[in-house]
Image: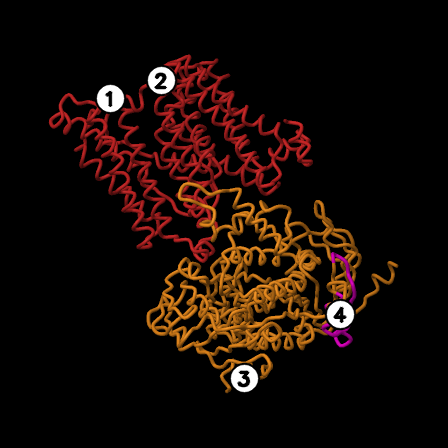
């Protein structure tokens, strides 16, 4: 119906019609169609591999016009981004803020915002103009950031705002946000939501991609669900519920987001008492000011707290890889532990699934096999030889237990999806049979299905008597999975809540220092 | 026997598809081997056959040994994300120290005890190299001074050291037992015995590893393909010995290099030390959090590099027969180029010793061929530069368009 297609529909800014994109061997998108209305915040929802990022890359011009089938009407005209057109997309007014920030950390906010299009006079940069324009943009959207600040010293939340300001400074009409909150604390997320509302009042359209289902209900006007490269539905958010949305995503009813385990915590096995520590790179800067907690055998202890409350610093310090301990005790089974590095921690029976799986968890260019066995080589190696066959047997067993999906154990980790990468990290740390497993944000950037599997695995481990310490930025997750919850604020433990008495409000009150 | 094998493993009956798979997996290795063969063919044609005469072929391999000892260590240095600019001068310094002892010390302290004197010279040379490597390694790994800076400083210090030892003059080091190290040849029969031993080992190793795989219940790879691969390698070994036997026989320094490269290949693939080095280069933080002592590993890598500089210096002293002011000049760049040509990534985490050896052979083959053609040294440098950059561009291009 060509007439209808080309009739100027003022309400619709993006009309995606039957977009199909093939890659060698796979169809990433198959006849995807939906409409984004002008000025709305449109959520894009789907598991990893559902096709969200492919679609986004088409809109950003990474995959140019002609490399896919179907039509995209942008403001009533067919959008034709030519080859090498990432620039062109921004000129058209479609800007993308990626999950991994793309700022130059050593430059100022202003330099970053105008990177590549600095205002010049005879090829010489006019700094005053650059900073004046920066201030103008920041003020317009009520972003509280000094234009001369060096980006590296801003928190992640502010960096995200700079990234958004950069996109907006190019007069974006459509702003695509790819998991903007995955690294943000609750307070920062609220800040971001506020900014999105301001953008909306300025008539900017947003496409919002996230793995955190609550956020769709918090901010979006309508949601499109993709599954296996196909559009499942587009609906106004007010017609949806969490359960409905999840069932659209996974294509079946998910009865529960958090599997009910049969955990029976026993005696106390691991204790931290009044731990104080300093930043190893800056003598005198305190990162922990008195943290005490204990974990029981077969228990899942949740650690909640805002970004910057010292959660990650706590676990990396306990693991011997970050802070310089100035005071306090760490005890395992009643014995004082003296841990100087990760090796000591592992020998004692601790494992740490680190926060940043790509940066700290995996050697991405290496195979699954090598990654799994890396901390465990002592098991199959003498000084002279690694028994490659024994290694393969042990790693295969782990990969099977965790249902890691890959062509073979020889596949490089950078070819895996986020959920599978996280499973490899967990596999690598389970092989050492830890007594205490510390997991720092284990489901960050992982899709619903894989999340569920990770939760089930945590339950199984706890039932076998492993003690788990889980840090999480998602309150729902902490509440859904923990037996007890320790809340941190400014490097201190502020309270220990039993799951029976814990609520979001209580946790937030402790985490913000109100109580 | 063969039939039961193939029956038990469904997926590996199709030889040609398996062959293709294996070829794809190791395409980079095959590509540089093909490049080497192309260079040989080109020079063979241009020199009307002289280039691949037994004599020149034999010399070609002998010429590559000094810098290739350095390249063996350099692979691991680069794999861990470091660089060592001092290796050429360190080998040079070792060579003049060895020459100094040969000419000025043993002639007075141990007259007429050639073998003992040479043994001591070798030990001193390797000791000096290892000690200097340990010093640099300590600065780099424990005191955290970047390797580029430490070894640049080392390069200058050693340049001074060479001038101090030689006092600006050339020191003769050519006692007969010293010369054996890089100038002697094995009699033809010995060459054949060594070749037979290698071939026997290759087949034993292949069958043994298949058997172990089966014991653990893994899918073994295509038997014919394994036999084909091992046979090809064996033919190469036999052909090599056949050719060099036409001239003077198997060269002592080439055998030394082959043994060193084989041991280091084993170390890099099959020991924790090697595995840790690759993990550190691939992701330092992940390696550290996996309980690897990145400091100790880096330190040991530089000690090893120093040791290999010692070996290279001893071979150099024996090869030239003199300790000279210019000893080892520019060898570090040849060693680095060999690694890069052989597929070692400057970003760290990737690289093989075998690749570096082929890379070294390519560099030597170029210089040697151009010398036979009487090309001016100036143009030799220009061509070497072009080849290096082109080779890396080809690699980048094919990776992008695969």
Q: Dot 1, crowdedness within 10 Å: few (<14), some or many (≥20)?
A: some
Picture quadrant of residue A167: bottom right
Q: Numbered disc 2: what chain?
A: B
Classify residue B177 by image quadrant.
top left
Between disc 2 and disc 4, the foreground one is 2
Determine crowd level at label 2: few under 14, some 14-19, many 20+ residues with C-alpha closer than 10 A: some
Q: Is residue B374 left or right of residue B125?
A: right
The letter of the red chain is B
Q: Which residue is mark 3?
A: A509
Is A241 inside the magenta-drawn segment?
yes
Q: Are marks 2 and 1 in contact (CB under 8 Å)?
A: no
Q: Which mark is residue A37?
A: 4
C-alpha distance separating marks 1 and 3: 83 Å
Image quadrant in which you'd find residue B210: top right
Q: Chain of mark 4?
A: A
SS class, disc 3: helix
Depth order, front residue of B304/B49 = B304
SS state under label 2? loop
Q: CA distance from mark 2 to mark 4?
A: 83 Å
**Which of the two residues, B253 or A8, is positioned nearer the viewer here?**
B253
Gap between marks 1 and 4, in whole Å?
A: 88 Å
* Chain for colour orange: A
Query: Where is B371 relative to A211, above or below?
Result: above
Q: Which mark is residue A50?
A: none
Q: Residue at x 50, y 35 (%)?
A: B390
Residue position marked by numbered label 1 in the rendering:
B177
Residue B119 located within the stretch drawn in magenta: no
**Label number found at residue B186:** 2
Residue at 44 percent of width and 23 percent of height: B197
Question: Earlier along the polypeptide chain: callout 2 or callout 1?
Answer: 1
Q: Which residues are magenta?
A: A228-248
């Amino acid at each position: 119906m060509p007439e209808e297609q080309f009739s100027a529909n003022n309400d619709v800014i993006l009309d995606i019609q039957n977009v199909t994109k093939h890659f060698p061997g796979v169809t990433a998108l198959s006849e995807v169609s939906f409409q984004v209305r002008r000025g709305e915040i449109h959520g894009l929802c789907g598991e990893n591999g559902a096709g969200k990022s492919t679609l986004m890359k088409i809109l950003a011009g990474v995959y140019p016009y002609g490399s896919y089938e179907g039509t995209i009407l942008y403001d009533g005209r067919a959008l034709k981004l030519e080859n090498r057109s990432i620039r062109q997309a921004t000129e058209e007014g479609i800007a993308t803020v990626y999950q991994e920030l793309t700022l130059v950390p050593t430059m100022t906010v202003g330099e970053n915002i105008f990177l590549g299009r600095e205002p010049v006079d005879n090829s010489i940069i006019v700094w005053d103009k650059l900073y004046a324009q920066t201030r103008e943009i920041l003020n317009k959207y009520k972003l509280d950031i000094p234009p001369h600040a060096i980006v590296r010293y801003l928190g992640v939340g502010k960096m995200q705002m700079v990234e958004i300001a950069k996109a907006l400074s190019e007069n974006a009409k459509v702003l695509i946000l790819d998991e903007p909150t995955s690294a943000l604390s609750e307070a920062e997320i609220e800040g971001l939501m506020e900014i999105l509302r301001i953008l909306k009042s300025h008539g900017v359209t947003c496409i919002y991609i996230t793995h955190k289902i609550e956020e769709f209900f918090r901010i979006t006007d309508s949601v499109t669900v993709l599954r296996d490269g196909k559009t499942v539905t587009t609906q106004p958010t007010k017609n949806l519920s969490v359960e409905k949305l999840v069932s659209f995503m996974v294509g079946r009813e998910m009865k529960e987001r958090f599997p009910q385990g049969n955990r029976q915590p026993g005696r106390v096995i691991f204790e931290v008492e009044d731990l104080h520590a300093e930043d190893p790179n800056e003598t005198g800067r305190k990162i922990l000011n008195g943290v005490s907690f204990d974990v029981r055998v077969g228990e899942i202890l949740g650690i909640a707290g805002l970004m910057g409350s010292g959660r990650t610093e706590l676990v990396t310090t306990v693991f011997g890889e970050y802070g310089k301990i100035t005071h306090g005790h760490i005890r395992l089974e009643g014995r004082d532990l003296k841990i100087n590095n990760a090796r000591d921690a592992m020998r004692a029976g601790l494992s740490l699934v680190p926060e940043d799986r790509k940066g700290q968890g995996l050697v991405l260019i290496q195979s699954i096999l090598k990654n799994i066995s890396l901390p465990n080589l002592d098991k199959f190696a003498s000084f002279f030889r690694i028994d490659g066959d024994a290694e393969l047997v042990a790693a295969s067993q782990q990969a099977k237990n965790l249902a890691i999906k890959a062509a073979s154990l020889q596949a490089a980790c950078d070819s895996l999806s986020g959920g599978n990468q996280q499973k490899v990290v967990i596999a690598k740390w389970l092989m050492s049979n830890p007594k205490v497993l510390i997991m720092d944000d284990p489901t960050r950037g992982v899709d619903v299905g894989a999340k569920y599997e990770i939760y089930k695995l945590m339950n199984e481990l706890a039932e076998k008597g492993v003690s788990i310490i889980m840090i999480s930025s998602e309150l729902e997750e902490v509440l859904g999975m923990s037996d007890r919850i320790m809340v941190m604020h400014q490097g201190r433990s502020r309270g220990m809540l039993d799951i029976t008495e814990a609520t979001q409000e209580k946790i937030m009150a402790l985490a913000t220092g109100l109580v | 026997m063969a039939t039961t094998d193939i029956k038990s493993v469904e997926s590996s009956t199709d030889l040609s598809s398996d062959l293709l798979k294996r070829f794809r997996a190791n395409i980079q290795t095959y590509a540089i081997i093909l490049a080497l063969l192309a260079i040989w063919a080109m020079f063979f044609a241009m020199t009307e056959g002289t280039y691949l005469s037994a004599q020149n072929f034999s010399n070609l391999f002998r010429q590559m040994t000094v810098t290739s000892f350095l390249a063996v260590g350099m692979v691991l240095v680069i794999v861990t994300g470091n660089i060592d600019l001092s290796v050429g001068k360190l080998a040079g310094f070792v060579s003049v120290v060895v020459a100094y002892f040969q000419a000025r010390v043993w002639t007075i302290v141990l007259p007429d005890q050639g073998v003992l004197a040479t043994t001591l010279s070798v030990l001193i040379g390797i000791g000096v190299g290892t000690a200097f490597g340990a010093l640099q390694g300590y600065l780099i790994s424990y005191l955290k001074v970047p390797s580029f800076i430490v070894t640049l400083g080392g390069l200058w210090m050693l340049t001074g050291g060479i001038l101090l030892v030689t006092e600006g003059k050339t020191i003769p080091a050519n006692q007969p037992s010293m010369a054996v190290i890089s100038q002697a040849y094995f009699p033809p029969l010995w060459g054949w015995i060594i070749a037979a031993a290698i071939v026997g080992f290759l087949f034993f190793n292949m069958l043994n590893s298949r058997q172990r795989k089966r014991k653990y219940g893994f899918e073994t790879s295509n038997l014919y393909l394994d036999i084909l691969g091992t046979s090809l390698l064996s033919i190469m070994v036999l052909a090599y010995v056949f050719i060099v036997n036409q001239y003077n026989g198997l060269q002592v320094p080439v055998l030394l290099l082959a043994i060193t490269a084989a041991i280091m290949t084993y170390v890099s693939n099959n020991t924790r030390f090697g595995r840790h080095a690759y993990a550190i280069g691939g992701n330092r933080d992940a390696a550290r959090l996996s309980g690897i002592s990145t400091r100790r590993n880096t330190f040991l890598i530089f000690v090893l590099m120093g040791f290999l500089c010692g070996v290279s210096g001893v071979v150099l002293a024996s090869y030239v027969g003199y300790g000279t002011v210019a000893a080892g000049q520019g060898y570090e760049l040849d060693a680095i180029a060999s690694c890069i040509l052989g597929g070692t990534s400057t970003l760290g985490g990737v690289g093989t010793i075998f690749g570096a050896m082929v890379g070294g052979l390519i560099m030597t083959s170029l210089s040697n061929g151009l010398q036979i053609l009487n090309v001016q040294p100036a143009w030799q440098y220009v061509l070497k530069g072009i080849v290096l950059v082109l080779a890396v561009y080809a690699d980048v291009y094919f990776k992008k368009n695969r």
